[in-house]
């Protein structure tokens, strides 16, 4: 398997000029026919650590003419997997998304599967029953068909085959050549009538092993009725001959995609191919242009009844508008008041959403909605308060970065508000009650969003706040047996404060959070925990931990080793691979400051003290620096100060080696200990 190393990029593959590589039209994998070799296989030779291997993933997309439905696409997928380890059982869980719009909807026309297990010298086959699948409503336009293959165990081979019928032809299903497990082969075929002109977009680092294009003569029959005098009708039919463009794309021995630390969503880097309809032309007919511009997409949204149209009815918010106008004469005060009103009155149902699910009046009455319901309502209220405000559409981090050349509305899944006051811009998301008006939640910090306004619109940078400061003040009381009692006060600002609150709120109770904190350190016994200013953004969030790290032997020691950072120490380098093909994404810059006072137990002196360090990533904008000092204050205590800054959030693949070396040095420095010696 060849991997392109130079740089991650999107490759435009014109479907008209693909060259032949000798592919055949034979089906690469037959249903129910599993080779004994795969049933007996204990590991995958190309990746002996793999917990599962995709033996084959074959997809075929056909567009056929149906006399009642017109042109319709049929996407069939046949996937076969070998499982080696129970940790990979979830690969047998499936969630097939079906899209709907109005009365048009996708549907599964075939769904079948098998699980094969070796029982001595015979093979036991357990069939999957379609009745075991269930549907789940994901959003107003998406339904998920969920199911799991039966009788899965270590050593199983399973296969699944399904067909999706779709009337939506402007975008075709995305085909992924790569997954979290290695793949023996992945093949995707397309059979497209000559009337359709699609643009193909290949993403990722894997290179296609074979690409083949062919043409085949096909035909379909068109039927119609003709009305005559006295309501008589006659039926007619005609055969239409056309050429079918056939495309075959295949990758062999695709390595497993490994999720790396500090990586944006894997969907940004997985090798895949997408298709967008550029134009459609029937014989002797005019060309219908489906290629889009950002201006056209902008106009489409503004004309939509569930987007731009929701701003036409504002009377329901009139009383709130009048109250805010009366109480807050300054525009920024009105902005903050409007944000807090929507934030406190509306409950986010945890759905993202690009479009309002209903009228904003009804959402206001229900006091809940998706992200679009809430943030479009905020835009409306800001406009009523005479503040320049517009929506910004974006793709959340989990949904992937928007490629600028892909002008497709389906790539966006979220909307926030943008307001401008005297040249100062504000990006606002009122979905969660812990988020202040001046910060975006982490899921929205994802490269760029698109401002939707009359005209062309523009790109908006979606950045985290730059002043993300963590200040830690610790005092350690070292006992002569080596036990340590500690009090740590942490003060967090902006994005790291928001991350802490988001994490804390995931626990069912403060006790659950304290249990998790206690479990994070070997032998750590938490005595108390307090949090202050959690709802006061005028002050840093303050958390105070008091704990002890006891020693089992209570007798005094001759030598005591103390690491002043305790559970703040970076014990290992998160960047272990020598090479990395994609960027390192810390989301936002962070400044960390540690001040530690180490009290020396009576009868002991400092035998060894780490030498301070001062280093940074070389270059004009290296992006990271580290500085430490260790000072003995008489014979009573030691003062330690550490400044660890990441001044930029994104490091390219070309910068990776320097970043990796920097973190290796940080780990080395933070492993250094203070050595205390008992006086004789």
Image (spheres, rainbow, N blue to C red):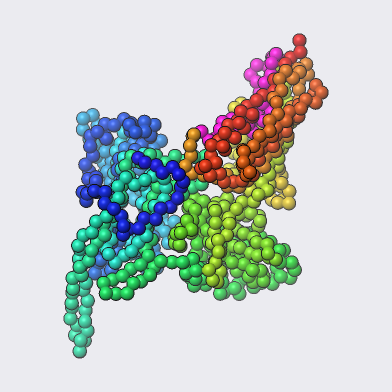
Magenta-drawn segment: 547-576
Q: Is residue 124 left or right of residue 428?
A: left
Q: Is residue 9 visible?
A: yes
Question: Image quarter for residue 312?
Answer: bottom right
Q: Looking at the image, which residue is at 20% across and 66% down? A: 219
Question: Image quarter for residue 232?
Answer: bottom left
Residue ranking furthest to the right: 634
Place of residue 74 in the rendered image (x, y in percent of width and height, measured from the top left): 29, 58
Place of residue 223 in the rendered image (x, y in percent of width and height, measured from the top left): 21, 73
- Residues 201 and 466: in front is 201
Q: Is residue 329 left or right of residue 152?
A: right
Relative to 347, does residue 57 appear above or below in the rendering?
above
Quadrant housing the C terminus = top right
Q: Is residue 151 left or right of residue 263?
A: left
- Residues 357 and 42: in front is 42
Place of residue 85 in the rendered image (x, y in percent of width and height, measured from the top left): 37, 33
């Amino acid at each position: 398997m060849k991997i392109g190393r130079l740089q991650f990029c999107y490759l435009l593959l014109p479907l008209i000029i693909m060259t032949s590589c000798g592919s055949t039209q034979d089906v690469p994998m037959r249903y129910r026919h599993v080779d004994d070799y795969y049933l007996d296989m204990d590991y995958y030779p190309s990746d002996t650590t793999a917990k599962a291997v995709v033996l084959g993933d074959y997809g075929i997309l056909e567009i056929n003419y149906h006399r009642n439905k017109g042109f319709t696409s049929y996407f069939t997928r046949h996937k076969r997997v070998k499982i080696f380890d129970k940790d990979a059982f979830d690969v047998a869980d499936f969630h097939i998304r079906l899209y709907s719009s109005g009365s048009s909807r996708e549907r599964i026309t075939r769904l079948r599967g098998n699980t094969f297990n070796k029982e001595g010298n015979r093979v036991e086959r357990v069939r999957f029953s379609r009745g075991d699948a269930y549907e789940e409503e994901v959003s107003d336009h998406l339904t998920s068909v969920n199911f799991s293959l039966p009788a899965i165990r270590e050593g199983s081979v399973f296969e699944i085959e399904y067909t999706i019928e779709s009337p939506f032809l402007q975008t075709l299903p995305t085909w992924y050549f790569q997954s979290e497990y290695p793949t023996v082969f992945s093949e995707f075929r397309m059979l497209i009538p000559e009337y359709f002109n699609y643009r193909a977009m290949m993403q990722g680092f894997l290179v296609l092993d074979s690409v083949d294009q062919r043409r085949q003569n096909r035909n379909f029959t068109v039927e119609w009725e003709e009305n005559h005098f006295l309501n008589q009708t006659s039926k007619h039919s005609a055969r239409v001959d056309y050429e079918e463009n056939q495309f075959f794309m295949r990758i062999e021995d695709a390595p497993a995609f490994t999720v790396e630390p500090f990586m944006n969503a894997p969907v940004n880097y997985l090798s895949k191919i997408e298709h967008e309809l550029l134009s459609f032309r029937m014989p002797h007919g005019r060309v219908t242009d489906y290629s889009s511009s950002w201006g056209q997409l902008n106009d489409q949204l503004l004309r939509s009844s569930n987007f731009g149209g929701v701003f036409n009815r504002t009377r329901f918010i009139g009383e709130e508008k009048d109250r805010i106008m009366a109480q807050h004469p300054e525009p920024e005060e009105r902005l903050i008041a409007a944000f807090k009103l929507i934030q406190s009155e509306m409950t986010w149902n945890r759905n993202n959403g690009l479009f309002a699910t209903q009228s904003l009046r009804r959402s206001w009455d229900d006091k809940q909605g998706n992200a679009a319901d809430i943030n479009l309502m905020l835009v409306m209220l800001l406009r009523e308060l005479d503040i320049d405000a517009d929506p910004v559409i974006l793709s959340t981090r989990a949904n992937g970065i928007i490629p600028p050349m892909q002008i497709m509305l389906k790539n966006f899944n979220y909307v926030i508000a943008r307001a401008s006051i005297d040249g100062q811009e504000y990006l606002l998301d009122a979905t969660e009650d812990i988020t202040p008006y001046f910060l975006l939640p982490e899921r929205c910090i994802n490269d760029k969003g698109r401002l939707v306004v009359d005209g062309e619109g523009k790109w908006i940078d979606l950045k985290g706040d730059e002043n993300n400061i963590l200040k830690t003040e610790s005092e350690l009381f070292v006992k002569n047996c080596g036990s340590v009692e500690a009090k740590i006060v942490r003060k967090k600002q902006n994005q790291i404060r928001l991350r802490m609150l988001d994490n804390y709120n995931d626990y069912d109770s403060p006790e659950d959070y304290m249990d998790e904190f206690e479990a994070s350190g070997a032998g750590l016994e938490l005595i108390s925990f307090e949090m202050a200013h959690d709802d006061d953004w005028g002050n840093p969030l303050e958390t105070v931990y008091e704990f002890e790290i006891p020693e089992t032997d209570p007798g005094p020691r001759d030598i005591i080793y103390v690491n002043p950072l305790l559970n703040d120490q970076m014990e290992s380098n998160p960047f272990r691979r020598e090479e990395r093909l994609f960027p390192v994404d810390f989301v936002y810059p962070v400044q960390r400051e540690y001040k530690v006072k180490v009290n020396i137990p009576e009868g002991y002196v400092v035998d060894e003290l780490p030498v301070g360090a001062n280093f940074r990533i070389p270059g004009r904008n290296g992006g990271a620096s580290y500085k430490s000092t260790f000072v003995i204050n008489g014979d009573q205590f030691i003062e330690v100060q550490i400044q660890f800054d990441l001044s930029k959030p994104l490091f390219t693949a070309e910068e990776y080696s320097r970043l990796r070396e920097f973190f290796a040095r940080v780990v080395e420095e933070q492993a250094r200990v203070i050595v205390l010696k008992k006086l004789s």
